[in-house]
Each structure stands twice: as structure tokens, then as C-alpha cells.
Image: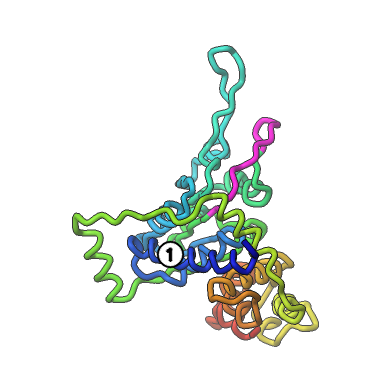
Amino acid sequence: MSDVESLKELLKKYQTLKQEISKVIVGQDAVIEQILISIFSGGHSLLVGVPGLAKTLMVNTISKALGLDFKRIQFTPDLMPSDILGSEILDNDRQFKFIKGPIFSNIILADEINRTPPKTQAALLEAMQERSVTVAGHHYKLDAPYFVLATQNPIEQEGTYPLPEAQLDRFMFSINLTYPSFEEEVQVVKLTTSSAQSDVEVVFSANEILEFQALIRKIPVADNVIEYAVKMVGKTRPNSSEALPIIKQYVDWGAGPRASQNLILAAKTFSVIKGKFSPDIEDVQAVAISILRHRIIKNYKAEADGVSVETIIESLF
């Protein structure tokens, strides 16, 4: 099968996948789209939303439809790195045996990641970046594909440990979940208070996802699109000569080179699901807010003047 035929097959399967997910999840189309772009681009996502917006159900449904293993880790202040990675125990033969932790799965839901201390948050770092973990000097590869979806509650900040910038940068997307519309909430209540059960069919296999991830990296991108993405990221840095007045006034730190890489990768995937074979500047703009949102550090003036990070990013277009 040629690459063009493979891309058409990916588009067809993607549309089937969205239909399967919609059997269980009402609305949240933009959120689901961004999570799927992240998976096919080989990235991780941070979901920011108040409790009760079906974040866990959404991830569980997506992993079922993708035919992947799914594990949920509830992050708490007393969670230890070994609770995530696993630990060595002495077996009956007096030999050390490694018992794998929940991190050994295809999709990990790190629930309320900011509830746990930095030492435990850091245990995720190697897994997210290297797709491997080191325990007691032994190196273990994680199953591919591997995808971390972390959630954060934006309201309750007591007893939380904000994620350091280095760890935030590991997430391709920061996705904001909003409340459903009136019609969607009515539909949710009908679905969840009746005896009807929706079965989600498996649409992809793990190998197919890996093949499509490799295929997306092969997609050609015009130089002017790459230059546009790099310039956009460069403009977020207040000490850059390209920085706009709004950046110099309201931003402490801008985005790093990983943002430029993610903009191009996500734009490639976005163009495929929109039926195109190469991304253009509009595709870069379509994914820019979720990619830059957590990489731009506002200063106290922005907080005082009520300037949102989204407003700052839109000024870069």
C-alpha cells in the first residue's frame, strides 16, 4: 500500500474511531480530536478541567477503541515513585524479582498529577521522554505505543505541587475541558441514568498505531510552514528582537524549541484528519493554542490586567 493510500486509510479509520467514542462520550469533540492528534503524533497530553467532566471515562473509552492497555494512577501526597514504577522483591528462591508497576501499560491516566510531591512527579519524566524506566540499576523498555494523559483540577490548589516547567514541556498539548452545553448535558443524563450499555468496538491495533505514527513523520512540510512555526515560537520569548509589545509587557518566559517540533508534528496529524496530505499555516494555527498554552509563563502584570494566555497566543497569528 502506498503512503497516500495509507493516509486515506488512516482518515477513514479515524472517522470510525470518533463514531465509536461518541457512543459513550457526548460532545467534547475538540478535546477528543486533540487527544487523538497527540496519540498519532506520539505525544502526551495534560487535561485541565473541574471534576465530573468524564475525563477518566473519556480516556478509558479512547483506549478501548484503540485496542490498547489502559491503567489509571490516582496521584496522592503519599504516593511513592515505586508505586508507579514497580519494585524488586525477594521471591521464594531468595532471588530478586521485579514486580512491574502500573506505568507498564500503553495508555496511562495520571489523575490529579499535581497532588503528588516532585519526587514522584519526576518518576514519570523518564517514562514520558525516554519510553523506559530504570529501577535498582536495571533498564526496562515500556510497551509501544506509550502515551501519558495527566489531569489537573484548576480550582482546588490547596495541598498541590505545581508541575515544574521542565515537566510541563514534556506534554505536547495542554487541553482545557469546559462544561457541556445544555443539550449535551441532557444527553449525558439520559445516557447515564438508564440501563442501556454502549459497547465500543476496537478500531485500531497497537501495530497499526505505530505504523500511522511513522507515516505521519514522513509527511512533507513546506519550508515556509516550518519557518512560520519557528518564528511564532520565537516571538513568545520576551528578550527576542521579534517579540511583540504584548509579549514584552506580559510574558516572563517564552516557549522552547520543543514547542516548534510539536507544532509541526501536530499540524501534520491535523492536516491528515482534515483530508489533506501536507500541512499549511492554518493547520499550525489550529493546534497552536493547546501547544503553547502551558509553555508561556505570564508575569504579574498579565495577572493584574486579566490578560489570558490564549489572548497572548492569538496575537502571534
Q: Which residue sits furthest top?
A: 93
Residue 95's spot in the image, x, y percent? Answer: 61, 16
Asked if the stretch drawn in magenta spans residue 137, the answer is: yes
Q: Residue at x 68, y 69 (%)?
A: 219
Q: Does 176 sit left or right of 240 as displayed?
A: left
- The N terminus is located in which quarter? bottom right
Q: Is residue 297 visible?
A: no
Q: Residue at x 71, y 86 (%)?
A: 244
Q: Is residue 267 visible?
A: yes
Q: Residue at x 52, y 55 (%)?
A: 149
In the image, residue 285 above or below residue 90? below
- Residue at the disc numbered 1: 16
Asked if the stretch drawn in magenta spans residue 105, the answer is: no
- The C terminus is located in which quarter? bottom right
In the image, residue 86 above or below residue 162? above
Q: In the image, which residues are magenta? A: 134-148
Residue 152's spot in the image, x, y percent? Answer: 48, 59
